Image (tube, rainbow, N blue to C red):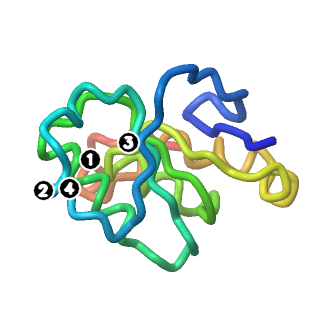
């Protein structure tokens, strides 16, 4: 069973509605206008070295997508802050990955706003 990671740590999947699954190479401009009515879009990450999913999330948010945005696949704890900054709300990982990268590793990155280099330069980031 997969694990959902968000800013509070590991969680069970509470989504019960329809899900739109996208691949990282999807052109969001080619999606139908009804996309705004979809409650959850899940973007598949085939490998942690493929950053196209981050770009897709950012484009969806810039297009005004208001719903829940989730990654699924090979994302590691070190990429959690990047996923949140790109516009993802949560990360779906396998139980095997959750066992290899415990919740504490993900929670260390849960204060993703505090680690923004621009905020640090302005002196407004919270000190860890």
- What x and y, as percent, mark residue 73? 61, 60
Residue in the picture at 22% in, 48% down: 60
Marking on residue 28: 4
Residue 29 lies left or right of residue 108; in this view the side is left
**Residue 50 at x, y percent in the picture:** 46, 77
Which quadrant holds residue 12?
Answer: top right
Contact flag, marks 3 and 4 (Cβ < 8 Å): no
What residue sits right under mark 3 in the picture? Answer: 113
Q: Which residue is drawn at 26% across and 47% down?
A: 123
User: What mark, if any, has residue 29 been given in the picture?
Assistant: 2
Q: Earlier in the sequence, mark 4 or mark 1?
A: 4
Q: Which of marks 3 and 4 is nearer the N terminus?
A: 4
**Position of the N terminus by quadrant:** top right
Q: Is residue 19 above or below residue 77?
A: above
User: Could you classify mark 1 by the number of other residues whose Cα lies within 10 Å: few (under 14), some (14-19), or many (20 or more)?
Assistant: few
Q: Nearer the viewer, residue 36 or 94?
A: 36
SS at circle 2: helix
Q: Are marks 2 and 4 in contact (CB under 8 Å)?
A: yes
The answer for how far apart the CA atoms under marks 1 and 3 are is 13 Å
**First of labels 2, 3 by sequence position:** 2
Camera-nearest label, 2 or 1 = 2
């Amino acid at each position: 069973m997969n694990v959902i990671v968000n800013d509070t740590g590991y969680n069970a999947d509470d989504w019960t509605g329809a899900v739109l699954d996208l691949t990282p190479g999807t052109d969001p401009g080619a999606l139908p206008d009804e996309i705004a009515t979809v409650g959850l879009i899940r973007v598949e990450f085939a490998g942690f070295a493929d950053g196209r999913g981050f770009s897709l999330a950012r484009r969806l948010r810039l297009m005004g997508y208001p719903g829940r945005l989730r990654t699924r696949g090979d994302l590691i704890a070190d990429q959690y802050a990047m996923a949140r900054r790109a516009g993802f709300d949560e990360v779906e990982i396998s139980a095997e990955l959750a066992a290899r990268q415990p919740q504490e590793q993900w929670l260390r990155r849960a204060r993703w706003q505090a680690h923004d280099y621009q905020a640090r330069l302005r002196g407004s980031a919270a000190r860890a």
